[in-house]
Amino acid sequence: MQRTIEILVATVIIGILIFSNTPHIKNIKNINKEIRTKENLMLIRTAISEYYEQHTDFPLDITSEKFLSQHLGKLPMITLDYPHQGWLYISQTGKIKIMSDHKDTKGQRISSW
């Protein structure tokens, strides 16, 4: 009987610890998705820079088959759980960013990455 009570108390304590850390676990998942998206953004920026070095102009369309096959293979995804409208590419300047008014886990606007 004593052993059963000890196991029950230990189970309750473990359960409390798990549920008290749930917001922290969710934040870690968001941070990982932010890191992955920033890496994808850097991949696209690097491909645009390579294109510019070869052609002395920015690509008109980063979703074109020619650009993707020569520089990226495929357009990387935005892996965020936050609301966003996708990539915003400005061909005149070669700038790319994420269209979103949401802030990341550090309080920075995602569109300013």
Image (cartoon, rainbow, N blue to C red):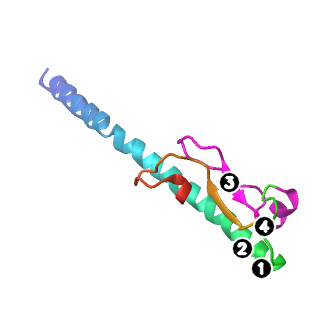
Q: Tag 2's secondary structure?
A: helix
x, y percent for residue 112: 53, 59
- The circle drawn on residue 49 is 2
Hey, what amino acid is under mark 2?
Answer: Ser
The C terminus, quarter of image: bottom right
In contact (CB < 8 Å): disc 1 and disc 2: yes
Hey, what amino acid is under mark 1?
Answer: Glu
Residue 56 position by quadrant? bottom right
User: Counting other residues with Cα less than 10 Å from the Cα at mark 3, is it few (<14), some (14-19), or many (20 or more)?
Assistant: few
Q: Residue at x 63, y 59 (%)?
A: 40
Q: Tag 1's secondary structure?
A: helix
Q: Is residue 5 above or below residue 93?
A: above
Is 92 situated left or right of 13 in this image? Answer: right
Q: Which residue is mark 4?
A: 71
- Please name which of the two marks, 3 or 4, marks the residue nearer to the observer: 3
In contact (CB < 8 Å): disc 4 and disc 1: no
Q: Which residue is mark 3?
A: 88
Q: Residue at x 28, y 31 (%)?
A: 15
